[in-house]
Image (cartoon, coloured by chain):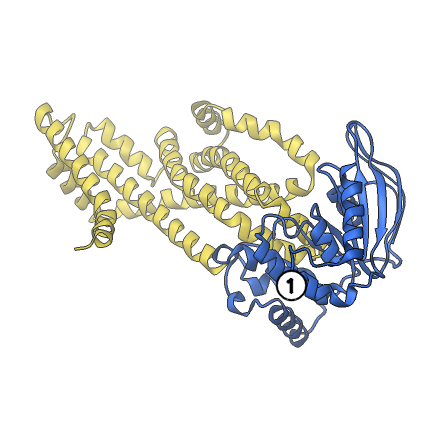
Amino acid sequence: MNKKKLYQILNYALPFVTVIIIVAVYAIISKVVGIELIAPSVGATLKEFFALFGQGYFYKAVGGTLLRALIAYVLSFALALILAILTKFCAPLRRALSPIVALVRVLPTMSLVLLALIWFKSFQATVLVAFCIIFPMLYTGICDAIDGVDKDLIEMARVYGVGKRKLVEKLYIPQALPSVFTSIKSSIGLNLKIIISAEVLAQTADSMGIYMQLAKINLDTAILLAWTIVAIVIGGIIEGIVSLVAKKAVKWL
Amino acid sequence: MIIKNLNFAYRENVIFRDLNMELPTNGVSCIMGGSGAGKTTLLNCISRQQHFDGNIEYGKEGASFAYVFQQPRLIPSMTVEDNIKFVLPKDLSEEQVEERVNDVIIKLQLEECRKSYPSKISGGQAGRASLARALVKDCDVLLMDEPFKGLDIKLKKEILSLLIPLIKQKSVIFVTHDVEDALAIADRVFVFERKENSCVIIKGQIDIVQNPFENTCKENTMQYGRDIYGEQLNHVRKEIYDLLTI
């Protein structure tokens, strides 16, 4: 086997090896602790994990959480994109928005959740919390992506009298898109995490968060871990899809 | 092209104060001078990339420009061919676009890399692609800012020999530090000078448009770097060197 082939195999195998090591370390901890209530065994956790797929509420909860995550993300992305484009051509608007973005960015998540719960119903509250955290990240990321477009190339296009539409289509989009996808990749997983956290606090019906909270109240740690694995798997799938789309889009452009 | 009372400053740093000059509408005007002498700034003012006070008359309303920058400035996500097409106006038919692009690609010997991306081509090919992009456009003024900077002498010679016949009928403003480049390409040479904390002055102007070597220009260019220009051209060279060094 040559070095290149070995490197390729290792490249694919190493992430699995890491997962196996983490599971093995947890299995040892579970064995050492010896209390199912605190650190349930790998077998018990996996049993609960697979059992979830047979429950009707599981699909409702996953669907509900994903719907809220999707709404929050689409809203955040759409507004971030629109405002980033507008502020690119209107510097005063960017300056006017900067304190709002800075404020939203530093606002403690817990105060945000509690205030949202006072003002809104739990569904809207979870979406609002995710929006308030994801929007500034995406807005800043998209602004940076647009600002990062090579100024020399823009200058070149202007001297040659290239039209605005062509400039956007052929220069801004292909140059900014890889950075925009980087922002999406780094925020989409976080979005799911925030939604689940907000669901726990807001006691949102038909959500992964509430079933995690119920498992905690019932001291059913294996179920809590099973839901955690579900969240990790869903987050991994979403990030995988985004990476694939990013790869295809960048290639296509 | 007439430049009247051009004033330009980078904040407190005055570059041009009431600069006046006349550039021939046909032929190659070469701007020379030391670093920071305002050569590139002048090109940027002419191409309206910089806001300035004063007046530049282009001899035509809405003059169009092509610009060969120091760096090729090719769009990395586009092939060489698409980079050349990028600057063409949208009112051209597909056939016209193809015809023009093919023409410059053949003239500048870019057939081999027309479908390649800028990251996959050599420095010489990138330089030629940048020239092709400038030449494909039917512009009123062609601006060239040290287009051979960083190229080795062999590449420079190769590009110059391709370039000279293509730009003879155009209005070209060419910035360079290299006297030999100027001698190979220019019809008129302006030497700029800018002393510390003062504005740019035109130290000298040398017309070489009527020089007896025009017919042998290509041959001379092919012999680029060698002292075969003859007495008269040696005299012009000395004059430029004197203006640049004294």
Residue B89 visible in this rendered orientation of the protein: no
- Tint of chain B: blue
Q: Position of residue B206 (x, y in %)?
A: 84, 50
Horizontal side of A51 relative to B66 (left or right) equals left
Residue B168 in the image: above or below residue B244: below
Q: Alpha-carbon neighbours of circle 1 within 10 Å: few (<14), some, or many (≥20)?
A: some
**What residue is drawn where x is 82% and y is 29%?**
B198
Which residue type does callout 1 highlight? Answer: Met
Residue A89: x and y in percent read 68, 43
Callout 1: SS: helix
Colour assigned to chain A in the rendering is yellow
Q: Nearer the viewer, residue A27 or A157?
A: A157
Name which residue lies at 61% across and 27% down.
Answer: A99
Residue under label 1 = B222
Image quarter hosting the N terminus of chain A? bottom left
Of residues B2 and A21, which is closer to you in this image? B2
User: What residue is rendered at 38% in x and 40% in y?
Assistant: A189
Q: Which quadrant of the structure image shows residue B184?
A: bottom right
Side of A248 where B222 appears, left or right: right
Residue A173 in view, yes or no:
yes
**How far across and down, in percent of the image, does residue A117 sit?**
45, 28
**Label 1 chain ID:** B
- From the viewer's side, name the closer residue of A77 and B173: B173
Where is residue B153, by image quadrant?
Answer: bottom right
- Residue A199 figure quarter: top left
